[in-house]
Image (cartoon, rainbow, N blue to C red):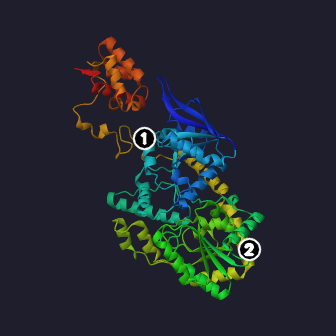
């Protein structure tokens, strides 16, 4: 296994130019971290075009372990998708460096430990602290594993709107929180070089429809219709086809699985994989009814394996009892799909995959493409992303669905908005108003149960389709191509809502001393004269810097060393103007801001006084 060269990227400044300083580099080699120094030069942040052309064109991963880990007790589709994306970026990404945007060095080291098992060659991993969005010009894009992009683009406006792109991805879009995030894409300073990846055309249609309706409302409310600038490319989620047993290994794994569960080689195994929840995944009873009818018609011995986990304990007796009531001829088996060995191997035990999704939570559906990667024919509902992944009568069967006409659920929408209904209850009501064609499902099951050649042919079609379209190697290449295209657009496209001089980058989160400047008697000005105060003695200064609540915030002021230089200069001259100190010590905006705050800090505690 290779090692990771880990670089922590921070800014250091001096009086002549800005330097990009990789503060520490850690070489991670199995069981040790060794710190060494490393320095690099950087051009000004405003020269973002040059940076993007010369650096890797990739994306910094905005990292929080919860979004990229399948090891938790509440395993969701977005966790599987996030982990698959990160593993693929590590293994198949073509950039020289991996970039992690994290809130702390601790989180960054966690990121490095997370990706270590996936390394196939030595990789350089660079940390960009969350509070330094200016450094994102190096990778050129920041990737967030959800649609909440507004805060990221507002933060970019404090730096340079053309410095980098912001990229997110859809998962569940039906919650009011995600809908608000989508609406924010209209009012936030999105640029033509930003993107929200839609995992299916079904999701893109929904997102674009919401953006259009919101834009039309804002035009009616305020006059002038906002333009939808964010790109909405369609890139599916992926599956690691190589992670599953293939060929003889798959046959042996399937035989072993069946022996352990007690299933004969000639019996038919129908497999469902996913959370066991009627409201957020698929109501099981229509599936149970179809399976019972198929068992009666074909006289086959059928086993239904549901490999997942029951999210709400109240549902467990209903899942199990309703199986006995509605499909008594079928052997219903429940397995914990959170266990990695089951998630990987259970596919090999199955003949047919089934997922009759009927809820508004689903947007893409990972399990059908996992089934396809394992060479299983799939029976899925004709619903959202399933419409695109499973080709009807080629890779399996899509079962027709039926919903009420629009405006039949406005009362549900209202009560979800006002919190009279929570999200699971809201989904439950909509799920019970969505019907899947049980007769069509029964017919599809009978065809596959009675025709092993059809199962084999559809399974091979599905496997080939998974390799060509949904393998993470293919999907991550599409991500990288998108990031390159966004970089090209950043160079040429006109900037939307450029920041005007003297105006706040984010009007709802401006400099407090601009918004609330009228609170004080006056503001510090360059004409004011400064002289030493009564407590400007070495002993009292030492105490000031030692006490926690008088030394608080030193990391956001100029260094103590420079403070001493300023005090020495004032002592020699008796009085010095603020402007003279500014001319000597502030060479850029950030230094100027730190310097003004430091002078007010020294005035606050009587070290300096304003001389009238």
Give the residue displayed 34% in from the left and 39% down from the top: 511
Is 521 positioned to the left or the right of 357 in the image?
Answer: left
For the N terminus, the quadrant is top right
The local secondary structure at tag 2 comes to helix
Give the residue displayed 54% in from the left and 42% down from the top: 108
Placement of 197 over or under 421, stated as above or below: above
For the C terminus, the quadrant is top left
Q: Position of residue 421 (x, y in %)?
A: 37, 69
Residue 550 or residue 560, whichever sits in front:
550
Give the residue displayed 69% in from the left and 75% down from the top: 263
The local secondary structure at tag 1 comes to loop
Placement of 605 over or under 280, stated as above or below: above
Q: Quadrant of residue 464?
A: bottom right
Residue 243 or residue 71, whichever sits in front:
71
Q: Position of residue 147 (x, y in %)?
A: 48, 56
- Which residue sits furthest top? 572
Which residue is under mark 2? 456
- Which residue sits furthest right? 248
Which residue is under mark 1? 158
Placement of 331 over or under 249, stated as above or below: below
Give the residue displayed 30% in from the left and 37% down from the top: 513
């Amino acid at each position: 296994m290779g090692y990771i060269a880990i670089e922590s990227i921070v800014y250091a400044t001096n009086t002549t130019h800005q330097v990009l300083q990789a503060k520490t580099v850690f070489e991670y080699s199995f069981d040790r971290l060794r710190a060494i120094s490393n320095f690099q030069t950087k051009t000004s942040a405003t020269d973002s075009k040059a940076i993007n052309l010369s650096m890797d064109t990739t994306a910094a991963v905005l990292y929080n372990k919860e979004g990229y880990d399948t090891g938790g007790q509440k395993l969701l589709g977005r966790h599987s998708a996030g982990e698959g994306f990160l593993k693929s970026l590590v293994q198949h990404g073509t950039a020289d460096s991996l970039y992690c945007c994290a809130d702390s060095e601790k989180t960054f080291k966690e990121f490095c430990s997370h990706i270590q098992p996936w390394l196939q060659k030595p990789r350089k991993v660079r940390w960009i602290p969350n509070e330094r969005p200016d450094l994102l010009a190096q990778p050129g894009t920041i990737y967030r594993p959800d649609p909440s992009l507004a805060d990221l683009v507002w933060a970019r406006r404090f730096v340079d709107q053309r410095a980098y792109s912001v990229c997110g991805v859809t998962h569940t879009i039906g919650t009011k929180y995600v809908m608000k995030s989508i609406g924010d894409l209209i009012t936030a300073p999105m640029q033509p070089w930003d993107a929200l990846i839609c995992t299916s055309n079904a999701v893109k249609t929904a997102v674009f429809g919401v953006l259009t309706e919101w834009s039309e409302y804002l035009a009616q409310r305020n006059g002038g219709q906002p333009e939808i600038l964010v790109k909405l490319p369609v890139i599916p989620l992926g599956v690691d086809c190589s992670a599953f047993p293939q060929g003889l290994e798959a046959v042996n794994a399937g035989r072993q699985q069946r022996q352990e569960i007690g299933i004969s080689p000639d019996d038919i195994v129908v497999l469902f994989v996913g959370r066991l929840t009627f409201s957020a995944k698929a109501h099981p009873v229509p599936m149970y009814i179809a399976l019972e009818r198929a068992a009666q018609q074909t006289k086959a011995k059928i086993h239904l394996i549901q490999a997942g986990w029951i999210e709400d304990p109240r549902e467990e007796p209903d899942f199990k009892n309703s199986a006995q009531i509605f499909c008594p001829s079928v052997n219903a088996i429940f397995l914990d799909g959170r266990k990695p060995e089951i998630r990987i191997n259970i596919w090999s035990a199955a003949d047919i995959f089934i997922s009759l999704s009927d809820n508004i939570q689903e947007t893409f559906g990972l399990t059908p493409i996992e089934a396809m990667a394992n060479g299983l024919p799939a029976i899925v509902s004709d619903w959202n992303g399933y419409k695109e992944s499973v080709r009807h009568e080629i890779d399996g069967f899509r079962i027709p669905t039926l919903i009420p006409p629009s405006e039949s659920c406005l009362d549900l929408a209202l009560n979800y908005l006002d919190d009279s209904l929570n999200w699971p209850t809201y989904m439950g009501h909509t799920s019970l108003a969505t019907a899947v064609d049980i007769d069509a499902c029964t017919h599809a099951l009978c065809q596959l149960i009675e025709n092993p050649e059809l199962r084999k042919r559809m399974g091979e079609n599905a496997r080939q389709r998974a390799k060509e379209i949904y393998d993470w190697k293919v999907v991550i290449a599409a991500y990288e191509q998108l990031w390159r295209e966004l970089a090209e657009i950043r160079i040429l496209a006109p900037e939307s809502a450029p920041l005007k001089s003297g105006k706040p980058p984010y009007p709802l989160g401006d400099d407090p001393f601009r918004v609330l400047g009228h609170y004080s008697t006056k503001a510090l000005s360059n004409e004011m004269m400064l002289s030493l105060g009564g407590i400007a003695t070495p002993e009292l200064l030492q105490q000031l810097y030692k006490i926690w609540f008088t030394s608080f915030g030193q990391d956001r002021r100029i260094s103590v060393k420079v403070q001493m230089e300023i005090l020495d200069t004032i002592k020699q001259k008796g009085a010095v103007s603020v402007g003279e100190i500014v001319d000597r010590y502030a060479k850029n905006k950030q230094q100027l801001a730190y310097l003004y705050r430091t002078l007010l800090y020294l005035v606050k505690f009587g070290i300096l006084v304003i001389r009238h």
